[in-house]
Image (spheres, rainbow, N blue to C red):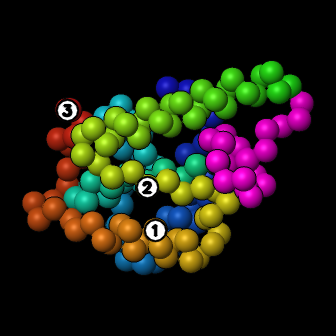
Amino acid sequence: MARVRSKDTKPEKCVRTFLHGAGLRYRLHRRIADTRPDLIFPSRKIAVFIHGCMWHQHPDPTCKLARIPKSRPEFWRPKLQGNRERDERQLVSLETVGWTVLTVWECQTRDREILALLADRIRAIRPHPLGGAWRSARNN
Ligand SMILES: [Zn+2]
């Protein structure tokens, strides 16, 4: 699978630092149902994606980071469209095997209120009493 960005981007680190500080423990870049979310919470079956606004085309019209580069639009448009379609397929794959998918956009990662809401969403899903689910999910 072609991944354009590196694994340890600054937005990812912001989210990880915040969630860790909020007492939440996660695993990084595990393979689930042919996807590789940025963070997973195995016992809660939650996958978190931290999306770059340009690469993944943040649909918020107020987002200034989502602008397509002015040069070579004929190159960028199909490429970014492909990224969006892949994101959609990953969402469906994960939901099909019972995972909850949460997406944080790059432009949101410095907003502590949004990160606090993310932590609340994660805590609202109770961990399974028998522990992690990522091994069994891989076989689905
Ligand atoms: Zn954005």
- Residue 70: % across, % down: 89, 35
Question: CA gap, disc 1 to disc 2?
Answer: 8 Å
At label 3, the amino acid type is Asn
User: Which region of the structure is painted magenta?
Assistant: 53-71
Indicate which disc, 1 or 2, sits on the residue closer to the N terminus: 2
> Which label lies toward us, 3 or 2?
2
* Residue, far left: 130
In the image, residue 112 sits, relative to residue 46, either above or below, namely below
Which residue does the numbered mark 3 point to in the structure image? Answer: 139
Which residue is found at the position 65% from the left and 69% from the top? 110
| Quarter residue 105 falls in | bottom right
At label 1, the amino acid type is Leu
Residue 87 is inside the magenta segment: no
Which residue does the numbered mark 2 point to in the structure image? Answer: 102
Q: Across the whole image, how many numbered discs are drawn on residues?
A: 3
- Is 95 left or right of 83, judged from the image as shown? left
> Marks 3 and 1: in contact by CB < 8 Å?
no
Q: Residues within 10 Å of mark 1 (few under 14, many from 20)?
A: some
Which residue is found at the position 57% from the left and 35% from the top? 84
